[in-house]
């Protein structure tokens, strides 16, 4: 039996959270088969099997912390499992039990080939109820008992759907509502969930940014009527090339052009606070509300990309972030960020800078509102509210106002961007 040690999965990472086991003890695995997903302070990482064999023990429960270079799970390599199974069979014929106990590698006395077949539903009260770690965690969160739930999976295995169906059932007469141990009747007892993974990192970084960077906020509104019309004309052309064209590529391209006029907005202050580093490349981050927490992947070199190329990168990074599978390289090197809170319905927001960047903009939802034209006539216009946050240690109000005006001009007259495209 061999222990699989958690390897180095990133620079400086010493621990990670076990998010989901893809196997249970007794499962037969193949080489390169996904075994477990772990969450570092950077991204979700999938760990695969080094060789074929049988899983004999999971050392770290789902939701718990695993240490780098510490055992993550134990397994019997395919050759070892076959050899020990033969030895077990021979010892049984001779009446010996010690070899069989050693061959299992689990808390039970069954050999690995026997563990792969979980107990049937009718045998719930006689042994371990078959269910995955994720299902067991769900059961614990709702203070249920596995033996009270009917399993619809193979050999009576309890599935997530079975737990949800059990929760939807009306309580029987005389049935007591499950209670948290030590709680009094009517007491509002919270469910405790450890702050781990990306959410823990977000908490730490937001506190650091909010307490160490003096924020200067600047708000405005942008008339995006012409921009919406242009996007509608270009959407079919983008779709013909397999790309979904949102407003984000226009926001990013206009921002990179505005940075050329105000390069200090794309600069960063060093840790000592005595040097400004001006970056020639505009790497624009976009905040994504992923299942793992807030992620800000960035599109590299926006100044040299076409709208279609930006759209392709935006789509790739958005899908990866929502699945929690963003490469660490996509999370590093950002120089300025966009938070599209309007996609969720917000109108205004005061964003916190994604340190060590110098600025971030929060984009509100677009609303059709009445506005006066140059002749004093009322027109129906698409108005989008925006709020900038700048690092007030080296960006003053005039700088961010001029930068915002340049960005706004490109978005309100999007055809003017053609003059600056290479």
Image (tube, helix red, strand yellow):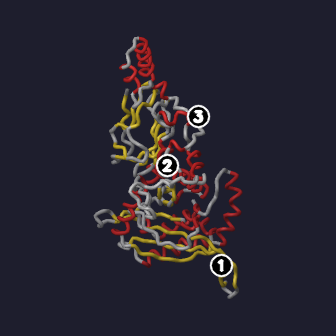
256 to 60, vertically: above or below: below
Q: Secondary structure at mark 3?
A: helix
Q: Which residue is mark 1?
A: 369
- Residue at 47%, 27% in the rendered image: 52
Viewer-side residue, 266 vs 91: 91
Q: Secondary structure at mark 1?
A: strand
Viewer-side residue, 118 vs 120: 120
Quadrant where the image shows the N terminus: top left
Q: Callout 1 environment at 10 Å: few (<14), some (14 to 19), or many (20+)?
A: few
Q: Which residue is mark 2?
A: 144
147 to 345, vertically: above or below: above
- Closest to the camera, between mark 3 and mark 2, is 2
In which quarter of the view is residue 200 placed? bottom left
Q: Position of residue 273 (x, y in %)?
A: 30, 66
Position of 3 with respect to 256 (left or right) is left
Circles 1 and 2 in contact, beta carbons < 8 Å: no
Position of 274 with respect to 154 (left or right) is left
Viewer-side residue, 181 vs 102: 181
Q: Could you give the CA–CA distance between mark 1 and mark 2, rounded to whole angstroms? A: 52 Å
Q: Which residue is mark 3?
A: 154
Q: Callout 2 environment at 10 Å: few (<14), some (14 to 19), or many (20+)?
A: some
- Closest to the camera, between mark 3 and mark 1, is 3
The number of discs equals 3
């Amino acid at each position: 039996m061999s222990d699989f040690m958690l390897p180095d999965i990133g620079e400086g990472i010493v621990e990670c959270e076990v998010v989901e086991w893809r196997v249970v003890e007794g499962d037969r695995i193949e080489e390169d088969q996904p075994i477990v997903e772990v969450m570092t302070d950077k991204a979700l990482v999938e760990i695969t099997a080094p060789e074929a064999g049988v899983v004999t023990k999971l050392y770290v429960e789902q939701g718990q912390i695993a240490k780098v270079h510490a055992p993550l799970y134990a397994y019997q390599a395919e050759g070892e499992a076959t050899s020990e199974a033969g030895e077990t069979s021979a010892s049984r014929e001779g009446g010996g039990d010690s070899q069989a106990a050693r061959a299992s590698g689990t808390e039970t006395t069954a050999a690995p080939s026997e563990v792969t077949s979980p107990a049937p539903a009718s045998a719930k009260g006689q042994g371990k109820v078959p269910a995955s770690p994720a299902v067991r965690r769900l059961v614990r969160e709702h203070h249920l008992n596995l033996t009270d739930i009917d399993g619809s999976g193979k050999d009576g295995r309890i599935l997530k759907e079975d737990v949800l169906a059990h929760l939807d059932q009306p309580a029987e007469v005389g049935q007591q509502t499950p209670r948290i141990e030590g709680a009094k009747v009517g007491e509002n007892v919270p469910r405790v969930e450890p702050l781990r993974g990306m959410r823990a990192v977000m908490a730490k970084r937001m506190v650091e940014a909010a307490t160490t960077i003096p924020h200067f906020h600047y708000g405005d509104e942008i008339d995006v009527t012409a921009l919406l019309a242009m996007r509608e004309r270009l959407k079919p052309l983008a779709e013909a090339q397999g790309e979904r064209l949102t407003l984000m590529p226009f926001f990013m391209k206009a921002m990179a052009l505005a940075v050329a006029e105000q390069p200090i907005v794309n600069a960063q202050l060093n840790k000592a606070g005595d040097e400004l580093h001006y970056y020639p490349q505009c790497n624009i981050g976009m905040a994504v509300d992923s299942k793992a927490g807030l992620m800000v992947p960035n599109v590299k070199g926006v100044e040299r990309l076409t709208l279609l190329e930006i759209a392709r990168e935006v789509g790739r990074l958005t899908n990866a972030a929502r699945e929690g599978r963003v490469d660490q390289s996509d999370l590093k090197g950002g120089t300025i960020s966009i938070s599209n809170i309007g996609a969720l319905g917000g109108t205004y927001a005061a964003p916190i800078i994604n340190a060590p960047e110098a600025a971030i903009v929060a984009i509100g939802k677009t609303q059709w509102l009445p506005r006066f034209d140059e002749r004093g006539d009322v027109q129906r216009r698409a108005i989008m509210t925006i709020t900038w946050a700048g690092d007030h240690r080296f960006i003053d109000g005039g700088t961010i106002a001029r930068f915002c005006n340049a960005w706004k001009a490109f978005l309100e007259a999007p055809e003017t961007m053609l003059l600056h495209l290479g």
